[in-house]
Amino acid sequence: MASMLLAREIPPYGGDTLFANMYAAYETLSAGMKRMLEPLYAVNSSAKADVTRTREDRLKTDGSDKAGRELAAEHPVVRTHPETGRKALYVNFAHTVRFRGMTEQESAPLLNFLFQHQIKPEFTCRFAWQVGSLALWDNRCAQHYPVNDYHGFKRLMHRITLQGDRPQ
């Protein structure tokens, strides 16, 4: 449902987090694109490239029986928020690999368009961390991306994720 990050140690520069508003990303699509996307389901995988390496490493160190195993889920491409009733785009570069019933190659052009659309500057903000900063966001209508631009320095964050409902 939501996640919180608390900055414990930050690098002398860099390490910001970008947040993107998925309500705005959906609402600015054309009526035709919305009609096409609304019945679609996205296939999401933990095995997509190296973007999920942190999660897989954490599963290994936590002794989870899920370590080394692909985790997959299907979710609607357009999600209706259970509290606000607003629709939001619900695909992301880190995990979405294709649309249900389509191959990765068939899905790629539309997914690439959506991935680029949802990170337009008008939908995003950049959060600059300080020690003790706390960020809270709703995973049902926002995405986050940590900027890895602090090579050679440590960035220590504590994260709490609150369980939510199944996307609809």
Image (cartoon, rainbow, N blue to C red):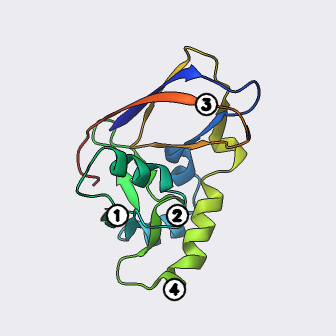
Q: In the image, which disc is placed on residue 106? A: 4
Q: Residue most toward the right? A: 13
Q: In the image, which disc is placed on residue 68? A: 1
Q: Which residue is labeled 3 in the image?
A: 155
Three-letter amino acid code at the position of disc 2: Ala
- Cα distance, mark 2 to mark 3? 42 Å
Q: Residues within 10 Å of mark 2 (few under 14, many from 20)?
A: few
- Of 120 and 29, which appears nearest the observer? 120
Three-letter amino acid code at the position of disc 1: Gly
- Cα distance, mark 1 to mark 2? 41 Å
Q: In the image, which disc is placed on residue 31? A: 2
- Of 71 and 108, which appears nearest the observer? 71
- Cα distance, mark 4 to mark 3? 38 Å
Q: Are marks 4 and 3 in contact (CB under 8 Å)?
A: no
Q: Are marks 1 and 3 in contact (CB under 8 Å)?
A: no
Residue found 50% across the figure and 58% down from its top: 92
- Cα distance, mark 1 to mark 3? 25 Å
Above or below residue 51? Residue 106 is below
Q: Could you tell me which secondary element the residue under label 4 belongs to? A: helix
